[in-house]
Image: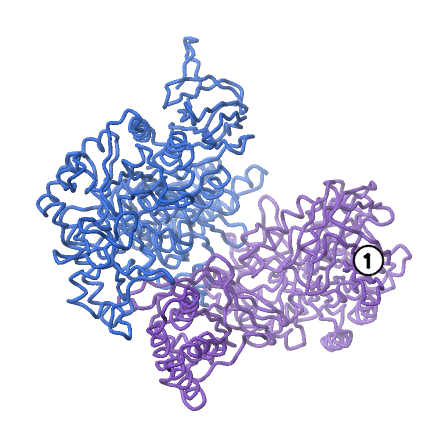
Chain colours: A purple, B blue
Amino acid sequence: MKGTTLISPRQRAESGPSETPEPADALRAPDKSLGQSRVIIENISPCIDGGRFAAKRAVGDIVRVEADAFTDGHDKIAVALLYRTGDSGPWNEVDMQPLVNDRWFGEFPVYAVGLLQITVRAWLDHFGTWVYDLQKRVNAGQDVSTDLQIGAELLEEARAGNEGDVDKQLADFARIIRGPDKGQAVQTALNPLVQALMRRHAPRKFASEWGRPLPIWVDRTKARFSSWYEFFPRSAANDPSRHGTLNDVLNRLPYVAKMGFDTLYLPPIHPIGRQFRKGPNNNPQANPGDVGSPWAIGGPEGGHDAIHPQLGTMEDFDLLVRACSDHNIDLAMDLAFQCSPDHPYVKQHPEWFKHRPDGTIQYAENPPKKYQDIYPFDFECNDFHALWDELLRVTLHWVNHGVRVFRVDNPHTKPFPFWEWLIAEVKKEDPDVLFLAEAFTRPKIMYRLAKLGFTQSYTYFTWRNDPYGMREYLAELTREPIIDFFRPNFWPNTPDILPGYLQTDARAAHIVRAILAATLTANYGIYGPAFELMDNQPAAPGKEEYLDSEKYQLRQWDINSPNSLSDLLTRLNRIRREHPALQQDRTLTFHNTNNPTVLAFSKTSGSSAILVIANTDPYNTQWADVDVKLDVLGLPHDRPYQVHDLLTGARYRWQGWHNIVKLDPGSQPAHVFAVRKHVRSEHDFEYFL
Amino acid sequence: MKGTTLISPRQRAESGPSETPEPADALRAPDKSLGQSRVIIENISPCIDGGRFAAKRAVGDIVRVEADAFTDGHDKIAVALLYRTGDSGPWNEVDMQPLVNDRWFGEFPVYAVGLLQITVRAWLDHFGTWVYDLQKRVNAGQDVSTDLQIGAELLEEARAGNEGDVDKQLADFARIIRGPDKGQAVQTALNPLVQALMRRHAPRKFASEWGRPLPIWVDRTKARFSSWYEFFPRSAANDPSRHGTLNDVLNRLPYVAKMGFDTLYLPPIHPIGRQFRKGPNNNPQANPGDVGSPWAIGGPEGGHDAIHPQLGTMEDFDLLVRACSDHNIDLAMDLAFQCSPDHPYVKQHPEWFKHRPDGTIQYAENPPKKYQDIYPFDFECNDFHALWDELLRVTLHWVNHGVRVFRVDNPHTKPFPFWEWLIAEVKKEDPDVLFLAEAFTRPKIMYRLAKLGFTQSYTYFTWRNDPYGMREYLAELTREPIIDFFRPNFWPNTPDILPGYLQTDARAAHIVRAILAATLTANYGIYGPAFELMDNQPAAPGKEEYLDSEKYQLRQWDINSPNSLSDLLTRLNRIRREHPALQQDRTLTFHNTNNPTVLAFSKTSGSSAILVIANTDPYNTQWADVDVKLDVLGLPHDRPYQVHDLLTGARYRWQGWHNIVKLDPGSQPAHVFAVRKHVRSEHDFEYFL
């Protein structure tokens, strides 16, 4: 990493924030004792709520830090980015470079999961100022005799505290600059090597430093780039008359792996309550044999740390986790912290629930609706410490069985401090554990959950089906500071949500939504096999629930149907793996089209460039002029380039910003183009990079 | 003030942040002991750099505070704004009201100069939630017997800690709600009076609070609204052969007062150095009798606390301050912290200056330019404490002589910590003292000076002459948080700057710039009589300095010239005084025109609405279609309204958003319209409000 160096022991002693008594900075009023600290540091990024929360990055990222830094008068300043692993220990230092308008930046790569701290330190660069002025004096033909003496003094001053070669070099240069040969003196003074030596070894008197180190949490790469597949284990049996088991899930693993998904999320696998059990289609009256909702957790067989007997045993589970691992798949568990009336907690810990004056326990409500099959925890209860501890124990129970990913059900109905604590405690045990927040709620609540530690979040993508809505929403999600803490995970459907859009022309709608989910964001997921088999019958007209939802009954799926979109999903996941541009969200850029039903956007990463153009009208063929932002894609304005459709294999030679597309929802509602520059070889052979 | 109440002793005891042990808030990670505090508070405004600096307001303002506040689940919350005078003592409380998207606001008026603190406190409104749910249950015809018991329990719980009438009322309501008459119970529960009682007296368990109180500095009104006039005392003699005196300034006061200016700024009035004194037009060789630059401060007669003998005595100065006061004018002094080589400090405190290896003192430089008549202080010197103390002493010397406004010369060439300390120390002595920063430098430096305490700031207005540039610049200045700490003061000219625009058609350019300065911002100033007499000869073609600048020589001005713009200035200042819309900057709104040389903008305050339309082309008559934003001005779309040109007296009846103007720079380059609604009286008589 250019500019990254481990700093010398002396500088380390100077640069540790904890060792500096109360530096002047943007968070603290300077008192008179700090009056000589003249450099101001402001507005560091990434910085979430003044450092209250960690910014998020993933292994493999380059962390870019920016800050405003300036001083009074005309003196030059030196600005350094300091970073370290954890919250103590030695700092590493990177020179920061100026951008425009007194903004500086520095970068470093991250290789390991865990907490980092960053801060910025700046000081007056007296030697740099002197060199800069000397050059101007020399250019103007002024007598610089006295100025050379000043420079020599700066070099001599820098000798103090340095030894050996450095001391000798500084002394030598000082002697030359002070010496009789003015030409050689000036030449030496302006030598970049001397400046580099002084940058490293000159005293950093009266340095300023940002008030408190800012945290960055580095996740494993899956936090940034993941492909989720969800299905109901109990529907995984090929036999319609039989309750699926974890072994059936095991047998379906090759199907999931072949499509290229890397995260398999199973709805809750715990014992299911009896009292007030729901029948098919959310019928309040269940018949004997009805399987109930897996989110009504807890029965005589156990609670959140148990496995529903019809699914199998803990041994089956361990086997499944190992098999997933063999397929490079993470098994994601559901954390749904609520109880059925039959949950063991209800008797063992009645103090964790709210009691009504009539002696009953308060069930979940959204008046006038009643959810009598669910008892929420009372997080305001006096015994909340024990409740928190138990929920942590349950979570770690699954971590100890190899679970590294949790999808958290309705986190926005439990207190924020609880999640912040729980996630931090789990990460102390295993920093690789990731949490996906299923909070379909108001934006600031979703953002708070992300800030306090959730790795990824469900989003409003499910209902953003028109280009205008998607552009506006993604502009918000990719803006600082939101992009620094909120990682969107785009789902076109979930067991709870069959959006109206998918109820239109099934095939076209499912295809375009899959393509958009898989390319707009680096994290996406689908609920299958309902998705690839294009199940799109609503529970009732105008409703967004699935008819015969698996939430309340077993379903059978013909996963080998020739109509299945599994080939499309396979292709999309391969494109995502092969093109780094699609493995991050920071470079998302929209390109204008003259057709409000056609969305165009690109992502780039290094030499990888993807341009997606999608017709969001599921009924009609649409034409559009697409204004390609050539500069964003690194393309020349005056030469051809190639767009290679990774879905169909077709290649087109385009030139300039103005291009026309025609997209037929019946055959191909979207292009996913790899964009390649046109190059003429030295043998006059033309090809595309 | 609606919603403002002094809170009860009991609530005060609960609501003081210092009395609450470590609340959960946006700045501190909650530990487990705070797990029951479920309300989150984020993103308070006004808040400058996390509370490091005070937001600015002026006496007479309504302070509007906003914050995001929300909780998990579906419970209602109560949010309160707390504010107090100073940084200790009792808090006042204002109920905050919801806006959209989990944002809340509260307001209170400020009546006195000094520091305020604000914070936000929020808690779960269990009673409010209960009432809300009860209404829905009742609407759905559900049995609410048990729910009424819950409500009665909440009322009884609230009795604890209350006495007398309140206790009795709570007990009575609880009894009714628990009682046999369900109809009466429900009616009582839904009675807004009961809710108000509970809002005031129910326990506020597990309240959350913003981490640290945020400061607001309240200035006197002049900080927000001021009209500055600058002239050189030594040119104030009517006799061209004579050096003007403070008595001549006294004689010119009625002229300044008649034009309606409220702040008279005099360039430095201290003894002027001899060595390297500059001659006319910045000639490095002065002749005997040349008066030199008043910014080369200090001679044998004294330094920054002395008065130049040719101007008069301290007694003359005191007389002048009193006379200004009689005209309701503030005398603004120049604080230029630099020395001529003849300043007494040079001998008394050589340690305050930088010394070169050749034994000389370092003069000011911007290589290769040399300013040998100026010695800057060395603020990095070891004795800087004594230097700071002396500069404070000098400042307070003038405060003790009645000076309440300082224009600070080049504050950006002295350390930021120095200014923050000095301004705070002066305000301890007299909080009415105001400071105008003359920092024509890079934006972040200007903003930092404003944050650390400067009351007002010079700006780039001087060079923003086209509508595009002015719109862009003012959009920045009126955006949060900048508008909360940076108060722009618009000057079309200064003794240092004769912008190119004023060198075009003198009369048209001066008129339009005066109108824009006086109406775009509530604080403005001019350097006269050069301005009203339209002096616009540059020192050399392409230069922005005045020819024969008063900085280096005496000038004579025919202030009674019939060509003078003094009548225009008089009229503008009267318009500003009579129209509150022009006394603040927060409501500035630009209106689109179809002519890029024509600028249109409005300001409103209560019923006061001003619409300015200006032709910025000093040579040509321009027509423009103006798209009036009717909603911004509170105007109906379907009825006429009146625009009354306050400069000419002409009145026009307009209707709708589309209107056409014609502006001739030779006669009338701009309209300054008072906008009045059209009203039909009950006697069918039409008039304009």
Q: Which residue lies furthest to the right in this view?
A: A562
Q: Quadrant of the N terminus of chain A?
A: bottom right
Residue at (37, 42) in percent of width and height: B538
Residue B198 seen: no
Q: Where is residue A526 in the image (x, y as percent from the top left)?
A: 74, 58
Horizontal side, residue A363 vs residue A261: left or right: left
Q: Provide the chain ID for the residue under circle 1.
A: A
Q: Where is residue B651 in the image (x, y as percent from the top left)?
A: 41, 17
Question: SS class of the residue under badge 1?
Answer: strand
Horizontal side, residue B404 vs residue A456: left or right: left
Horizontal side, residue A298 vs residue B81: left or right: right
Residue at (52, 61) in percent of width and height: A99
Q: Badge 1 local density, few (<14 within 10 Å), some, or many (20+)?
A: many
Which residue position is annotated with label 1? A644
Residue at (42, 35) in percent of width and height: B504
Position above or below: A630 against A218: above
